Amino acid sequence: MSAVLEVTDLQIQFGGVKAVDGLSFVANAKEIIAVIGPNGAGKTSAFNCITGFYKPTGGSVKLNGAEITGKRPADIASGGVSRTFQNLRLFPDLTVLDNVRAGMHLYGGQNFLDAIFHTPRFKRSEALYTDEAHYWLDFVGYKGERGVPIRNLAYGQQKQVEIARALARKAELLLLDEPAAGLNHNEKQTLLELVRRIRDLGTAVVLIEHDMGLVMEVSERIVVMNFGKEIAEGTPAEVKANPSVIEAYLGKDDEEEVPSRGDA
Ligand SMILES: Nc1ncnc2c1ncn2[C@@H]1O[C@H](COP(=O)(O)OP(=O)(O)OP(=O)(O)O)[C@@H](O)[C@H]1O
């Protein structure tokens, strides 16, 4: 297996808060990793450091062996890292198709003059983008209208479109931030199968997720964070049996549960 993502001793501090305090893990091609932990554990901050939205205060992030620590988000994205967000970040007034196409201009090869003068190269690549957008919408199982504004869609469909857009960037590494949040049981099952099919493309998938049933079923390895620190890493069975993990989850009184199968 080859390491797509290597995170080593990652740290970010906001004032006195060490949001991420020494996180290390590797994500290989064709592997599904989950990052779990109670609210405020530092999971999204870690994603933001990996994708360049935050500049880490320590540690390193490597993509296919090359240092990307602290690079700009656009450079990291064009290097092969895609993500979805906890709160959807789509263009509400653009159509479904255009939202997915918008993800592709990062690797487009068009230049400014092509776009202004609608050169043959521009037209060819626009047609290609449209075909590819349809391909990825089919891939994620999107069944709705494609020429309507995103704001008209149900939430579950919007989440499908966001994943299609992330895939359209030809990601080697896909980071999914709470992909199951707000989905119903059937939609979660569809998501689970989709994540496996994305893995089978050769992509390294790292997901943050609170739905422990889904995490335990889909992940090959799980990294557990609490108060910024990594408290465990292992297979679902290992993590479930780890006393520190059980304590982290039991030591709080919101709706999150001790990891167990079958509560998706
Ligand atoms: N931009 C920021 N400025 C200041 N503090 C921040 C910032 N982003 C995150 N934090 C703090 O860092 C800590 C970790 O937050 P983070 O959102 O990464 O946790 P999380 O594990 O993703 O939580 P959740 O599961 O609720 O999404 C929290 O104490 C949070 O308040």
Image (spheres, grey):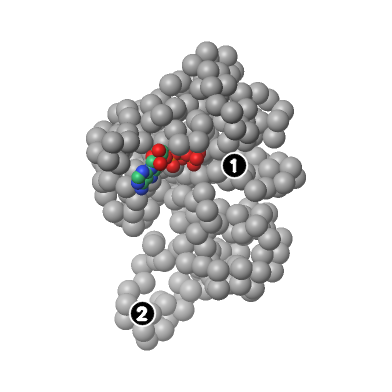
Q: Left or right: where does residue 127 sit relative to residue 262? A: left
Dividing the image into 4 quarters, which one contains the C terminus?
Answer: top right
Q: Ligand 1 within 8 A of label 1's CB?
A: no
- Residues 39 and 53: in front is 39
The spot of residue 206 in percent (x, y) is: 48, 38
70 left or right of 50? left
Residue that carries the numbered disc 2 in the rendered image: 114
Residue 245 vertical position relative to residue 106 in the rendered view, above or below: above
Counting residues from the start of the chain, the first of labels 2 and 1 encountered is 2
Which residue is drawn at the image coordinates 58% and 36% (left, top)?
Answer: 210
Q: Quadrant of residue 67?
A: top left
- Residue 237 seen in this snapshot: yes
Amino acid type at mark 1: Val
Q: Find residue 88 and report its horizontal and vertical position in percent.
A: 53, 56
The amino acid sitting under disc 2 is: Asp
The N terminus - image quarter = top left
Determine the image quadrant of residue 139: bottom right
Query: Percent x, y for residue 101?
Result: 50, 67
Q: Which residue is labeled 1 in the image?
A: 195
- Alpha carbon of mark 2 to alpha carbon of mark 1: how far? 36 Å
Displayed-image quarter of ligand 1:
top left
Q: For the residue labelled by badge 1, is the local secondary structure a helix, a strand or a loop?
A: helix
Name the residue rendered at 68%, 43% in the picture. 188
